Amino acid sequence: MTKTTNNPSNRRDLCALLSSLGLLLIAISMLVPVLKGSFDQALWYRYIYAAGAAICLAASLFNPSADLDTRSRRWQRIESWSSILFATGAAFMFIPDQSPRDWVAFTLAAAALRLICFFRSFFARKKQAQNNN
């Protein structure tokens, strides 16, 4: 028997898994220049970052939100904006004569949005669990 992804909770779980994979690729690509000592020595990190940003963007585009309440949908849209910021950072990596601070700034802004959304959803779930008890 095969699993279908038509169920919104299954699709949401799959999108969360893909988003985590994309964030892991972005984190790896951020560490490579730091470990190598220069942004110019290992240029392949750009492609890892771009792949992670594309995976995050695709996961946020296909993440279902029809069965969520309005507040959760708004936070999910903010999380989608962080994926757009990651994709913008990836675009800045491939523009010639750009300094690393441009894509690093977009990456840090997107990471800040992701952290805010993560902690908000964590505390919302915790509050909901307390209300159910």
Image (cartoon, rainbow, N blue to C red):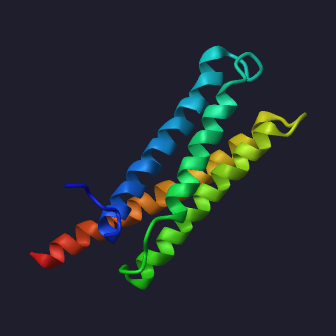
The residue lying furthest to the front in this view is: 1
- Give the quarter of the image for residue 48: top right
Foreground residue, 81 or 52? 52
Q: Is residue 45 above or below residue 121?
A: above
Quadrant into which the N terminus falls: bottom left
Question: How many callouts does the rendering have?
Answer: 0
Q: Is residue 94 left or right of residue 109?
A: right
- Give the quarter of the image for residue 44: top right
Point out residue 11 in the picture as x, y percentages from the top left corner. 37, 63
Q: Is residue 41 above or below residue 26?
A: above
Q: Residue at x 33, y 58 (%)?
A: 13
> In the rendered image, is residue 112 in sight?
no
- Give the quarter of the image for residue 30: top right
Q: Is residue 102 left or right of residue 16?
A: right
Q: Residue at x 77, y 34 (%)?
A: 100
Q: Is residue 120 above or below residue 48?
A: below
The residue lying furthest to the right in this view is: 97
Point out residue 43 in the picture as x, y percentages from the top left corner. 73, 23
Q: Residue at x 78, y 43 (%)?
A: 92
Q: Residue at x 62, y 37 (%)?
A: 49
Foreground residue, 31 or 9? 9
